[in-house]
Amino acid sequence: MNRSDIVRAAYQRFNEGDFDGALDLCDPDIEFRDVIGHDGTVSGREAVRRRWAERFSHAHITVTVGEVSEMGDAVVAAVCCQVYGPTGEPVGPPVLVTDHFSFRDDRILRVESTVFDGVPEEVKDFLLHVTP
């Protein structure tokens, strides 16, 4: 599996709610910057798993993957994210993101995201303040 395939597989597992499966493709020292909140970067598989569990305990996110390109040792992916509430209704508009993946050997080491128009306030409020 090349690095683009690893990234696509991670998105697929994430979309399926298989956080452990997605994290299996990551280095134990994974660094993931939270673009929804203001809590910065979380490091380590367990911390990332906890963050995802917190964010998506009452919501589901679907990541539609567009172009995935290898650039030297990195992979860049253009994606569209849509958050859905507990009854399946969309929350806010889709969010366009470019994710930059750094690797250590064949494992994802760091994910850095650039959100084009920012995360809409209704999406932030929903993911940060609604309890299951």
Image: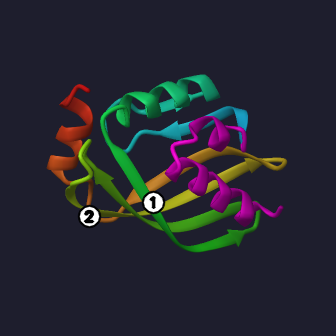
Rendered view: 15 above or below 131: below
Q: Nearer the viewer, mark 1 or mark 2?
A: 1
Q: Which mark is residue 63?
A: 1
Residue positioned most to the bottom: 67
**107 sits to left or right of 14:** right
Q: Which residues are magenta?
A: 1-25
Name the element at disc 2.
Answer: loop
Rendered view: 63 above or below 68: above
**Crowdedness of circle 2 by 10 Å Cα count: few (<14), some, many (20+)?**
few
Front-most of residues 101 and 23 = 23
Q: Which mark is residue 117?
A: 2
Q: Quadrant of residue 89?
A: bottom left
Q: Quadrant of residue 118?
A: bottom left
Rendered view: 93 above or below 87: below
Q: Which mark is residue 42?
A: none
Amino acid at pointer 2 = Asp
* Most common secondary structure along the magenta stretch: helix
